[in-house]
C-alpha cells in the first residue's frame, strides 16, 4: 500500500511598508520614477553616508506585531547581513537578527477543515534592495536604486501549515490585517507582498521533520498554490524512489509550472551578521506601545462584532464586506450618509461585486465616492429613479464617479409621475394591444405583464412600475 | 613678521584686525608646502584654486564687517577620509583613487562655517589602518622632526602638515589612537573627543563604533577652538550625542588646583621607553607643582584591550569596506570575467596588504561558528574595560600616561612586524573602546630630538577638564610651538 505523506509548510513573508520615505533616508518610496531619481548618498551606499531610522517604520512594525499577537521586543537592534550583490549598494543589508522587533505571535485561519492557529516565530524590519536590469543585447547590467532602502518587514511563521489551502488562508489573513492597519497595500503582483515557501514532507504520523526546501519567486496566490503542489509531488517522488531531498533554495517558474535549484545548503552564504554600529538600539517604552495600540484601527473581528450590533445586515454580507478594509470603509461611509445600511450593503454585495468581476478589479482599486452611492440610494428611495435606471446610474458612478442627481437630470432619467401623461400613454398601449386587453378581461391575469412591459417601454423605463400597474388595472376595469 | 610662526588663533586675530590678509596666510602655507612636500608628503591633494577662492570670500566678509569667528581665514587641512563635495577623497587607497564625493562631511561643513580656508586633503594610512602612514597608496609621510622617521598614524599627514607649518590646524580621525599617537610623534596637540561629539557623517568609516574626528593643532588654545568649531549634534549621524556645552575654549584656564590625576601603573611598566617615561613623569610633576594631586593606581585589563580592539575594529571594517567593489565608484580592475571575477580583481588590486589583512581578520571573527568566541567575547571585554575606567573616574578627574610606548620609529621598521605595530597602540586603544576623550600634548624630546607626547584621558564629556590640564601645563612650561629644524631651513 502506498505511504501517506504529510506536507509541512512554513512561510517567510516580506511586506513593503506604506511609508512616504525610505527606512534610513528621506528619499521617496514612490513606485516607478526614472531610474536612480529617488536616491541619495545613503541609499546608494556612498562612502561616509550614515543611516537614520524612520520612526514610522517602527510604528507600522509595532502595529503589525501587536495585531498578530506578538511580543514587542522593547530594546531591539539592527544587524548587518553581509553579502555581495550589485543591487545591494553597501554589500550589506541592514536587517534584524539578534533582537527582532516582534516575536512569538499567532494568527487564526479558517479553512474547510475548520479553525487553526498559525504561530509566528518572529518579525523583523529591514531595507529592500535595488533592482537590476539586464541588457542582453549589450551584455551589461544596470542598477536602479530607487527601491533600495524601501522599508520591509519580514514575518517568519512556524512550520504550522499542512496544505496550500492553509497557506493561502494564512496569507489572506496577514494581508487583511496589514491592509486594515494601513501599513501596506500588500499587492503580490507589484511585489509589495512577497512570500517564500519552506516545505518538507514526512510520512503521516511521523514526529520528525523532513528535509526542507525554500521556494522563491512566487507572485500570486495561484502560483503559490501550484508551487506547493508541485514541490510536494517532487519531494514525494524523490522519497519513493529512495532518494534524498536536498536542502536548497529553488526558484518557481509559474509558466513552466516547474521549479529549479538556485543554490544548495553547501554554497549557502555565511552572512556574518553583527550589530549595526551606525544605529543605536531602539528603546520601545510601555507608553509607546500603548500609544500605537490606542491608534490601532478597528480590525476585522471587531468590525464584524460591531456590524452585528449596529446594522441589521446578514452575517454573510458582513463577512464579505469586511474582507477588505476598502470595502468596509465604503460601506460604513455610505451607510452613515444615507442612514440605510441594508441598502448600502446590497449595492456593494450585488452591483459592486458584479462590476468588479467584470472589470477584474480588487477592492483596493475602487474609486467611487460613498457620497454618490448614498445619494443614489436616496434617489431610488424617493422614487426619483426606478431600480433599473438606478442600476444604470450606478454603473456610471462606478466607472466615472458621477454625481447621480445631476446625471439623472442631465440624461432625463427621472421618473414620470404625472398621471395625465401616463394615462395618455396607457390609452395608446390599450388601443394598440386589443388581444392582450381581451385576454385580461377574459380572466388571463398574465396578460397584465405584457401590458406593463409595453407601457414601461413606451415610457423609456422612466415610470414607476407600481403606478403603471395600478393605473392599468383601474383603466381596464373602466 | 613670519606668518607661519603664529598659532591659528593669533593668525585669526590679525586677520580680523586686517593686519594680515587671508590671501597672505594662504600664500605663506602654500609656499611652505611647496618647499616641504617633496620630502614630507603630508598632502594627497592640495587645492590651490579652491584655497584662494575661499580666501577671497572670507576676506570679503571680513572687509564688509560681517561677524567673523576666531578661525576665520585660517588655513586648515583635512584628513583624506572626510568627504568634500567634488574634491578627490581617497582614504589614501587605490580603490578610491578617482573618487569625488557628491556631498561634504558635517565636520568639514562646520569647519567651513567657522571660516577656515581648506588647503587640501592629508595623507594617511590606507583607510586609517596603520600606525605609521606608511600604508598609503600615495607613499609614506615623513616626520618633519626627522625625515628618517615616520610621523605616526593613521592621521600622520594631518600631524606632519601642522608640524611642518603647511597649515595652521588640521582635522584627523582616531579609531585606536590615530590622532593621539601621530600628534605625540610630531610634537603637536591632538584630541580625540568623546564618541558622539563630532559628527561622523561624511567620514569614511573604518571602525564605526570607535571612529571619532578631532582637532590637531600647534597648541592647546587652538585645539579648544577647533574642537568648538567642529563639534555639533548632527541628526544625520544616529550616534551623535547632543551635548549641553560646546564652549570648549572656556576651559582655557591656568588652574589645576585640586585636580585629581591618576597614573596607571599598567601604562608605566614593561615595554615603555625609558626616555618617554621620564618625560611623562616630569610633566606630571609640573601639574603637581601647580596644585594637582598625582598618584599611581592599577587600571587593569590593559593587555586585553589590543585583541578586543583588533577584533571589533576589523569586524566592522570588513563590513564597512564591502561597498568598495568597483560597481558604483572608485577603481575597477580592467579585464575580468563576469561579476565575481570583477569583484575579486578590483578588490585584490584596489586594497593594500594591511587593509586586506584586516578584512580577512574581520571576516573570520564574524564567521558563523566563530562569532561567539571572538566578536561577542571582544564586546564583553569592551564593556569590562569601560567599567574599569568608570571605577578609576570615581577617584580621579584625569588619567595621565604616555600616548605611545616610544617616540617615532624609523621608516620601514614597523610594517614587517604587524603584531609589534599593533602593540604600539596599547595606551590609546582602551580610550576608543570606552568611548572616552583623550588628548596628546607635547612634553619634550628624547635624546634623538624626537617629540614625546603625554596622554590625558577624561571621563565621558570631560574634554574641558583635559583642556584645562593641558593648558595649565603649557602655561607652566611656557611651551611654544617649535618649528622642526630641518623644515625651517628648507623654507
Image (cartoon, grey):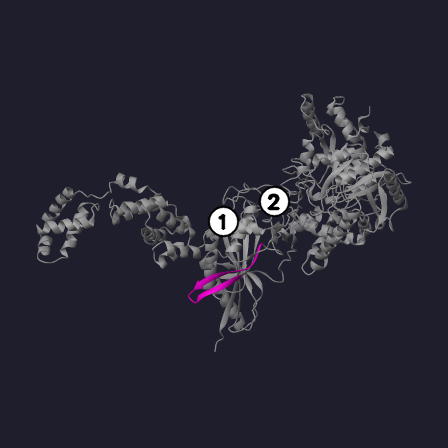
For the residues tagged 1 and 2, is the chain the same? yes
Q: Is residue A413 above or below residue A176?
A: above
Identity of the residue furthest to the right in this view: B447
**x 86%, y 34%: residue:** B476
What residue span does the magenta drawing correspond to? A101-119
Please state which of residues A354 and A74 is positioned toward the viewer in this rendering. Answer: A74
| Crowding at mark 1 (Cα within 10 Å: few <14, some 14-19, many 20+) | few
**Mark drawn on residue A295:** 1
Residue depicted at 75% across the width and 34% down the height: B250
Assign the N terminus of chain B to one quadrant of the image: top right
Could you tell whether B131 is left or right of A241 in the image? right
- At label 2, counting other C-alpha atoms closer than 10 Å, the crowd grade (few under 14, some 14-19, many 20 or more) is many
Quadrant in which the C terminus of chain B is drawn: top right
Q: Return the x and y of residue B61 as percentages of the image width and height.
A: 67, 24
**Majority secondary structure of magenta residues:** strand
Task: Report in which chain the residue with disc 2 lies.
Answer: A
Q: Is residue B474 above or below residue A100?
A: above
Residue B328 vs residue A432, the one in the foreground: A432
Q: Position of residue B366 (x, y in %)?
A: 69, 56
What is the quadrant of residue B280 in the picture?
top right
Q: Secondary structure at mark 2?
A: loop
Q: Quadrant of residue A71?
A: bottom right
Query: Where is mark 2, residue-wise?
Result: A52
Residue found at x 62% / y 60%: A267
Tell me which numbered mark, 1 or 2, is placed earlier along the sequence.
2
From where the camera sits, is residue A123 visible? yes
Report, in whole angstroms, how far the alpha carbon at label 1 lies from the one at label 2.
24 Å
Question: Is residue A473 placed above or below B454 in the rendered structure?
Answer: below
- The x, y position of residue A376, in whole percent, is 30, 45
Amino acid at each position: 500500500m502506498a505511504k501517506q505523506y504529510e506536507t509541512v509548510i512554513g512561510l517567510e513573508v516580506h511586506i513593503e511598508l506604506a511609508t512616504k520615505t525610505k527606512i534610513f533616508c528621506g528619499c521617496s518610496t514612490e513606485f516607478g520614477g526614472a531610474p536612480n531619481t529617488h536616491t541619495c548618498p545613503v541609499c546608494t551606499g556612498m562612502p561616509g553616508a550614515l543611516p537614520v531610522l524612520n520612526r514610522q517604520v517602527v510604528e507600522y512594525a509595532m502595529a503589525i506585531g501587536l495585531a498578530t499577537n506578538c511580543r514587542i521586543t522593547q530594546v531591539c537592534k539592527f544587524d548587518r547581513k553581509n553579502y555581495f550583490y550589485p543591487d545591494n549598494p553597501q554589500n550589506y543589508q541592514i536587517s534584524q537578527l539578534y533582537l527582532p522587533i516582534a516575536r512569538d505571535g499567532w494568527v487564526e485561519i479558517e479553512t474547510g477543515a475548520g479553525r487553526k492557529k498559525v504561530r509566528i516565530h518572529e518579525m523583523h524590519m529591514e531595507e529592500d534592495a535595488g533592482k537590476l536590469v539586464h541588457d542582453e543585447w549589450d551584455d551589461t547590467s544596470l542598477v536602479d536604486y530607487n527601491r533600495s532602502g524601501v522599508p520591509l518587514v519580514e514575518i517568519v511563521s512556524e512550520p504550522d501549515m499542512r496544505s496550500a489551502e492553509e497557506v493561502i488562508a494564512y496569507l489572506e489573513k496577514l494581508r487583511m490585517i496589514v491592509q486594515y492597519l494601513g501599513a501596506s497595500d500588500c499587492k503580490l503582483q507589484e511585489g509589495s507582498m512577497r512570500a517564500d515557501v519552506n516545505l518538507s514532507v514526512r510520512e503521516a504520523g511521523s514526529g520528525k521533520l523532513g528535509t526542507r526546501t525554500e521556494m522563491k519567486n512566487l507572485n500570486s496566490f495561484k502560483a503559490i498554490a501550484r508551487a506547493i503542489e508541485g514541490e510536494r509531488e517532487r519531494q514525494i517522488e524523490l522519497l519513493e524512489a529512495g532518494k534524498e531531498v536536498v536542502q536548497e533554495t529553488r526558484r518557481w517558474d509559474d509558466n513552466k509550472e516547474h521549479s529549479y535549484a538556485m543554490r544548495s545548503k553547501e554554497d549557502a552564504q555565511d552572512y556574518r551578521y553583527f550589530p549595526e554600529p551606525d544605529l543605536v538600539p531602539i528603546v520601545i517604552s510601555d507608553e509607546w506601545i500603548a500609544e500605537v495600540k490606542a491608534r490601532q484601527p478597528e480590525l476585522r473581528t471587531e468590525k464584524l462584532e460591531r456590524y452585528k450590533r449596529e446594522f441589521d445586515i446578514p452575517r454573510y454580507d458582513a463577512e464579505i464586506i469586511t474582507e477588505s478594509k476598502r470595502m468596509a470603509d465604503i460601506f460604513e461611509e455610505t451607510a452613515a450618509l444615507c442612514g440605510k445600511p441594508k441598502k448600502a450593503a446590497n449595492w456593494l454585495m450585488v452591483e459592486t461585486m458584479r462590476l468588479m468581476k467584470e472589470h477584474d478589479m480588487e477592492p483596493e482599486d475602487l474609486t467611487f465616492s460613498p457620497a454618490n452611492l448614498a445619494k443614489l440610494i436616496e434617489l431610488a428611495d424617493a422614487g426619483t429613479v426606478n431600480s433599473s435606471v438606478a442600476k444604470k446610474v450606478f454603473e456610471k458612478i462606478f466607472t466615472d464617479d458621477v454625481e447621480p442627481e445631476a446625471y439623472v437630470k442631465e440624461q432625463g432619467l427621472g421618473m414620470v409621475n404625472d398621471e395625465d401623461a401616463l394615462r395618455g400613454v396607457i390609452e395608446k398601449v390599450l388601443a394598440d394591444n386589443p388581444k392582450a386587453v381581451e385576454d385580461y378581461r377574459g380572466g388571463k391575469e398574465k396578460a397584465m405583464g405584457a401590458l406593463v412591459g409595453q407601457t414601461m417601454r413606451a415610457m423609456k423605463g422612466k415610470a414607476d412600475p407600481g403606478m403603471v400597474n395600478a393605473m392599468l388595472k383601474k383603466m381596464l376595469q373602466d | 613678521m613670519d606668518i607661519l610662526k603664529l598659532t591659528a588663533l593669533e593668525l585669526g586675530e590679525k586677520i580680523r584686525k586686517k593686519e594680515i590678509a587671508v590671501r597672505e596666510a594662504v600664500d605663506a602655507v602654500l609656499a611652505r608646502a611647496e618647499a616641504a612636500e617633496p620630502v614630507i608628503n603630508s598632502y594627497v591633494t592640495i587645492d590651490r584654486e579652491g584655497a584662494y577662492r575661499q580666501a577671497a570670500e572670507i576676506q570679503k566678509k571680513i572687509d564688509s564687517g560681517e561677524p567673523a569667528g576666531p578661525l576665520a581665514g585660517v588655513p586648515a587641512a583635512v584628513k583624506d577620509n572626510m568627504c568634500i563635495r567634488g574634491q578627490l577623497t581617497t582614504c589614501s587607497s587605490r580603490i578610491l583613487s578617482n573618487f569625488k564625493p557628491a556631498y561634504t562631511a558635517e565636520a568639514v561643513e562646520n569647519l567651513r562655517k567657522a571660516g577656515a580656508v581648506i588647503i587640501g586633503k592629508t595623507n594617511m594610512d590606507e583607510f586609517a589602518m596603520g600606525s605609521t602612514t606608511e600604508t598609503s597608496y600615495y607613499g609614506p609621510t615623513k616626520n618633519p622632526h626627522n625625515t628618517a622617521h615616520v610621523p605616526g598614524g593613521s592621521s600622520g599627514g594631518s600631524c606632519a602638515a601642522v608640524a611642518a607649518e603647511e597649515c595652521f590646524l588640521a582635522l584627523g580621525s582616531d579609531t585606536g589612537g590615530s590622532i593621539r599617537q601621530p600628534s605625540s610623534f610630531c610634537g603637536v596637540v591632538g584630541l580625540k573627543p568623546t564618541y558622539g561629539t563630532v559628527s561622523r557623517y561624511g567620514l569614511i568609516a573604518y571602525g564605526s563604533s570607535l571612529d571619532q574626528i578631532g582637532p590637531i593643532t600647534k597648541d592647546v588654545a587652538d585645539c579648544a577652538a577647533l574642537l568648538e568649531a567642529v563639534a555639533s549634534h548632527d541628526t544625520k549621524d544616529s550616534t551623535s550625542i547632543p551635548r549641553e556645552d560646546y564652549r570648549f575654549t572656556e576651559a582655557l584656564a591656568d588652574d589645576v588646583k585640586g585636580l585629581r590625576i591618576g597614573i596607571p601603573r599598567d601604562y608605566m611598566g614593561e615595554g615603555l621607553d625609558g626616555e618617554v617615561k621620564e618625560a611623562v613623569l616630569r610633566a606630571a610633576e609640573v601639574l603637581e607643582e601647580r596644585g594637582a594631586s598625582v598618584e599611581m593606581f592599577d587600571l587593569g585589563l590593559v593587555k586585553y584591550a589590543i585583541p578586543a580592539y583588533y577584533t571589533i575594529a576589523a569586524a566592522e571594517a570588513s563590513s564597512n569596506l564591502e561597498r568598495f567593489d568597483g560597481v558604483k565608484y572608485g577603481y575597477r580592475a580592467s579585464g575580468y570575467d563576469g561579476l565575481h571575477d570583477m569583484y575579486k580583481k578590483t578588490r585584490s588590486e584596489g586594497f593594500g596588504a594591511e587593509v586586506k589583512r584586516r578584512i580577512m581578520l574581520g571576516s573570520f571573527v564574524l564567521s558563523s561558528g566563530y562569532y561567539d568566541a571572538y566578536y561577542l567575547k571582544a564586546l564583553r571585554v569592551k564593556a569590562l574595560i569601560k567599567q574599569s575606567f568608570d571605577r578609576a573616574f570615581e577617584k580621579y578627574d584625569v588619567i595621565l600616561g604616555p600616548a605611545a610606548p616610544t617616540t617615532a620609529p624609523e621608516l620601514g621598521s614597523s610594517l614587517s612586524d604587524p603584531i609589534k605595530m599593533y602593540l604600539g597602540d596599547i595606551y590609546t586603544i582602551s580610550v576608543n573602546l570606552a568611548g572616552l576623550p583623550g588628548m596628546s600634548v607635547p612634553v619634550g624630546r628624547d635624546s634623538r630630538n624626537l617629540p614625546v607626547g603625554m596622554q590625558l584621558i577624561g571621563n565621558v564629556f570631560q574634554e574641558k577638564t583635559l583642556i584645562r590640564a593641558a593648558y595649565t601645563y603649557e602655561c607652566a612650561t611656557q611651551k611654544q610651538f617649535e618649528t622642526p629644524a630641518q623644515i625651517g631651513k628648507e623654507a
